[in-house]
Image: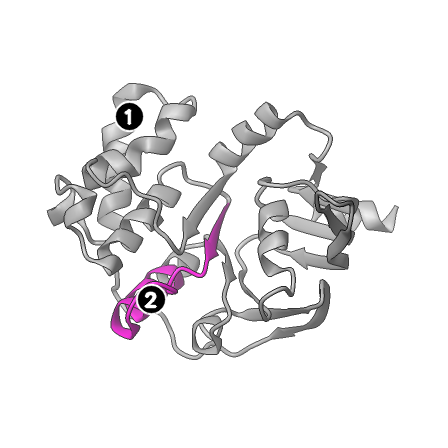
Amino acid sequence: MIWDFIFMSSLIETKNLSKTYRDESGVETEALRGVTLTIQEGEFVAIMGPSGSGKSTLLHILGFLDRESGGEYRFSGEKLSNLPDDKLAEIRNKKLGFVFQSFNLLPHFSVLQNVMLPLHYGDTPESEWRMKGERAVEAVRLSHRKDYPAVRLSGGEKQRVAIARALVTEPKVIFADEPTGNLDSKSGQAIMEILETLHARGHTIILITHETYTAEHANRIIRLKDGTVESDTKVERRRNAQEGFLK
């Protein structure tokens, strides 16, 4: 009873979450072992850990890209793991946004075309695609590049396009998987400022990173080790989002 009440008050909730992989020879590897955590709507959470700690596996499960082997996961109070893949994909498209280290842009599509791509797979009327796309592009200060092909952009600009693409469906949560991993320090700082500003505007941000200076932009750091939660701490923001940024 109490557990159900906690679930209903949280955006993301896991209880004893586990994930086991089996290779071709039948050898099993436990990637997650009893992960229990709660993420409230509007939080900025960084998930850290060394290679093999389970952070990418956790991201994939929280983002409906994979399924848990055991335990329980609820999103907005609902247990969704029993839904078929097509239903999960529909929810993922509407309620989640993803930003990956490798950008995943179509190189010869324009900035605006890349940003509008998620709208092709949802129920947003086509008459609204351009408006929503331009609004998302403006949010990352790339309106002057909206007609440029992605191949002509710098790495930092490509990641800003990826963030705009994640924003265009107005998702409940944005997952950022090592978003600064392919960028120089200046471009990486600009990306983190964008994420800070989006959080200040009410977006829930879940950041996967191995970089301490990147994680310090979050309000909370969850550290994984060997598939378990090693620590879960609130942190004082290293810096405030730049006043007026993205206006």
Q: Residues within 10 Å of mark 1 (few under 14, many from 20)?
A: few
Residue ID for mark 2: 193
**Callout 1 secondary element:** helix
Residue nearest the viewer, comparing 24 with 147 = 24
In the rendered structure, the answer to whether residue 237 lies left or right of residue 66 reads left
Query: Disc 2 residue type?
Result: Glu
Relative to 233, is 228 above or below? above
Residue nearest the viewer, comparing 21 with 26 = 26
Q: Residues within 10 Å of mark 2 (few under 14, many from 20)?
A: some
User: What residue is rendered at 13% in x and 47% in y?
Assistant: 145
Query: Disc 1 residue type?
Result: Glu
Residue ID for mark 1: 128
Please provide percent x and percent y for residue 73.
72, 45
Relative to 229, is 97 above or below? above
Q: Earlier in the sequence, mark 2 or mark 1?
A: 1
Relative to 231, is 15 above or below? above
Magenta range: 173-196
Relative to 216, is 18 above or below? above
**Callout 2 secondary element:** helix
| Residue 13 counted in the magenta span | no
Please provide percent x and percent y for residue 62.
61, 47
Please provide percent x and percent y for residue 82.
73, 30
- Per the model, the C-alpha gap separating discs 2 and 1 is 28 Å
